[in-house]
Amino acid sequence: MFSPFLFALGLLAQDAEAAPAAAAPAAPAAEAAEAPYPPGAPRDAYGLVAWCYGALSGHRDLRERAMPEVIRIESTFRRPGTSLEEDLAVYDELDALSERNLGLFRRAMEAAERASPQPLNVQGADAVRRGRATWSQAGELSDARLAQEWMSWTLPARCEATAVALERRARLAQPAFDFDRTAPAQDAPAEVPPESTETPGEP
């Protein structure tokens, strides 16, 4: 959907003046969980969620650059019975959805990191970097082409479903992994009061 697969899928026509594609309906949760892995993404749940976080944050970071051209495209290619204001409002809604999904991904990763007996930070940072790298060619594109790619991109269906499942499993597993850290310390031997050095009083 985006580099390295962003540019390979050809979701839009090659003509820089092509009208934006209509958004596809969201897949049901069960189907989303079985959706194909995005090309180049890790296959483990934690790594995939971290990759999705990187890819989505990279897309969101390009919003400021893309929007002027998006407005031009939406203004030029008007669909009958729609208003420019309504169509542009969709991008604000998508931005809010992206923010919520980033929060979900962040929570799921943090829950997995707390539950895991082994450090995951390095693995997660690498997966986030790989996800963001899918937008690495954005700087080489014209504004018109970048806007088309940005408008056509959708979060891979597997991302959200995997994050929900990862957070749930991690929260269930965390008490077991935290046993050694949360178990109460063994009772210390009772302290024996020191012997008194005072001379007992005469009866």
Image: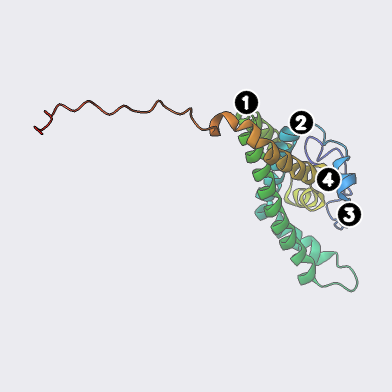
Mark 3 or mark 2, whichever is nearer to me: 2
Mark 3 — residue? 24
Mark 1 or mark 3, earlier in chain: 3
Mark 2 — residue? 44
- Disc 3 element: loop
Q: Residue at x 83, y 45 (%)?
A: 157
Q: Which residue is drawn at 24% across and 26% down?
A: 194
Mark 1 or mark 2, whichever is nearer to me: 1
Foreground residue among 84 and 175: 175
Q: Residue at x 88, y 37 (%)?
A: 36
Separation (CA) of disc 3 from disc 2: 26 Å
- Disc 4 element: helix
- Disc 2 element: loop
The amino acid type of the residue labelled 3 equals Ala
Q: In this view, does 32 lie to the left or right of 147?
A: right
Q: Are marks 1 and 2 in contact (CB under 8 Å)?
A: no
Which quadrant is the C terminus positioned in? top left
Where does the image place residue 97, in percent across and percent down from the top left?
73, 56
Mark 4 or mark 2, earlier in chain: 2
Mark 1 or mark 2, earlier in chain: 2
The amino acid type of the residue labelled 1 equals Gln
Inspect this view and state whether residue 88 appears.
yes
Mark 4 or mark 1, earlier in chain: 1
The amino acid type of the residue labelled 4 equals Ala
Foreground residue among 12 and 143: 12
Separation (CA) of disc 1 from disc 2: 15 Å
